[in-house]
Amino acid sequence: MTWLRVCDALNAQPGTKTTLKGWVRTRRDSKAGLSFINLNDGSCFADVQIVAPADLPNYENEVTKLTTGCSIEATGELVESKGKGQAVELKADSITVLGWVDDPDTYPVSAKRHTFEYLREVAHLRVRTNTFGAVARVRNCLAQAVHRFFHERGFSWIHTPIITASDAEGAGEMFRVSTLDLANIPKTGDGHLDFSEDFFGREAMLTVSGQLNVETYCAALTNVYTFGPTFRAENSNTSRHLAEFWMIEPEIAFADLEADMKLAEDFLKYLFEAVLEERADDMDFFAQRIEPTAIDRLKHVIDSDFKRVSYTEAIAILEEANTPDKKGRQKFEFPVSWGSDLQSEHERYLTEEHFKAPVIVHDYPKDIKAFYMRLNGPDKAGPDGRETVAAMDVLAPGIGEIIGGSQREERLDVLDHRLDEMDLPKEDYWWYRDLRRYGTVPHAGFGLGFERLVQFVTGMGNIRDVIPFPRTPGQAGF
RNA sequence: UCCCCGAUAGCUCAAUGGUAGAGCGAGCGGCUGUUAACCGCUAGGUUGCAGGUUCGAGUCCUGCUCGGGGAGCCA
């Protein structure tokens, strides 16, 4: 017997005979001799209404006992609805209960409002709610659009490793990967851990970034990207951080920072267009119930050019804004000065108040950025000729830093000088340095935190609610 | 890791140091082409854990556990 997903049934011609399968959202009985069942199968935001007449053989014993969460399949004819609220509904000839809800009184996601905090404790069932179903569909839509965007532009998706054998990536605390017996750890003669006994014969970690690895493929395939899980063992407890998250990192050869910024802007606009086009139903829900500006701000981003401002210019804007008022009070809690990193409040001011749009800040002081970022010439120096690197951050209203990227240092002598300056051992970077010895080219790339993207699109306030099973300090259930 | 806040019925929340309640959900009944349905009745509690103060603690004090918000780190 053929059956239809709910999204297809809702668009089918009246008169179609079919079967629907899914989970009961609500049931309403009418003494006129029928029950109404709202069925959802996750294929779209909407439920389909099933009309169950009282002459069904299992009407008294089963249909009127259905509660939220039961799984059923219903066969019948799609007809124009006599009631308001839906165009078509299924007039059922038969309803088969596939799975009952054991003790409806304690079913964790009953048909009522629940807090997001509570639903995190029942992460295996929360996707059955309107909000988490919508998040799951939008997340999938964005992931598919990421691959489509790059595929259409001739990028190759590179599967960079999850396990990495050195901590040379330098982007934060790392998780150790080991098969050593923790109750009986091998030691070397001088009392240190003997990693030669471990699975890889050396210390191994979970990756904090695919960038260094993907640069190798960039230096052969020209345009590449990674899209996969990333791990940070930082003890961060905020609504914007996860210990396990997904990151997208494109890397483009024969390209400078300008091309990198253009790519980031085109990329975000493409993704926002895709989600407005493909998930209009879910976006309507987010705009109605989660974040009123959810749709408008995406349209606004699509329609406007990203503001671009150099770090030096940004500091000037912030200093101007921070001029003490008559009572001597300053706008910002943290001081603004050339050479220090922008605080959350500074980034928020730039994107939310000053420009009221996504902003790309570029050409940062070299001392606050990573070793691999390309050293700028004197034309882009800061006050007193202080050096900058070709780095850029994309700041988005309501979310802060959503993209961080740079042109990479392709000159071996300059790279070596930077490694020395930062006390990083060259031997750890031998293959990375090889790329600069054998046919080096100008190249650039950026990293986009996928969950932060989903947060920005949906307006969901906590990053733990835009990934199916969040991992945070002290939390790895499910 | 730091600062603030919180933990009471399945869920969301009330309760001046003095007999623990409501709404929703659930069960039963009524009503109705219903749709956040509506009306009535019923069940549902070792007030996060361990101590302490008090004639008496959900309430005050101490410690612990868990959770939330903000900060830092970043994506």
Image (tube, coloured by chain):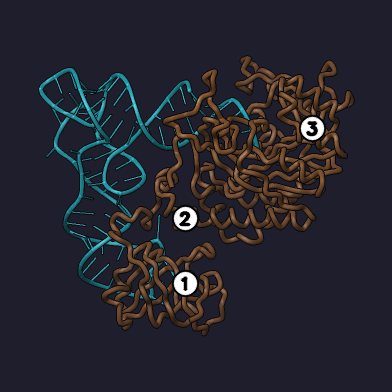
Q: Are marks 1 and 2 in contact (CB under 8 Å)?
A: no
Q: Nearer the viewer, residue A212 or A448?
A: A212
Separation of marks 1 and 2 at Cα, in angstroms: 27 Å
Residue A458 image position (x, y, % from top left): 58, 49
Q: Does label 3 or label 1 sit earlier along the sequence?
A: 1
- Residue B39 shown left or right of residue A311 in the figure: left
Q: Residue A433 — which label?
A: 3
Q: In the image shown, does A88 or A451 lie closer to the viewer? A: A451
Q: CA distance from mark 3 to mark 1?
A: 68 Å
Q: Which chain is cyan?
A: B
Q: Mark 3 vs mark 1: tell me if same chain.
A: yes
Query: Which chain gets the brown colouring?
Result: A
Q: CA distance from mark 2 to mark 3?
A: 46 Å
Q: Earlier in the sequence, mark 1 or mark 2?
A: 1
| Amino acid found under the numbered disc labelled 3 | Arg
Amino acid type of disc 1?
Lys
In the rendering, which numbered label is found on residue A84?
A: 1
The vertical placement of B73 against A32, above or below, is above
Mark 1 vs mark 2: tell me if same chain. Answer: yes
**Residue at numbered disc 2:** A127
Mark 3 neighbour class, 10 Å CA radius: few under 14, some 14 to 19, many 20 or more: some
Which residue shows up at 63% across the image and 23% down it?
A331
- For image coordinates 76% across by 19% down, the residue present is A421
The secondary element bearing badge 3 is classed as helix
Look at discs 2 and 3 and give the one toward the viewer: 3
Residue A253 spot, x, y in % from top left = 83, 44
Between tags 1 and 2, which lies in front? 2
| Percent coordinates x, y for residue A232 in the rendering | 57, 35
Q: Residue at x 54, y 33 (%)?
A: A197
Q: Residues within 10 Å of mark 1 (few under 14, many from 20)?
A: few
Q: Secondary structure at mark 2?
A: helix
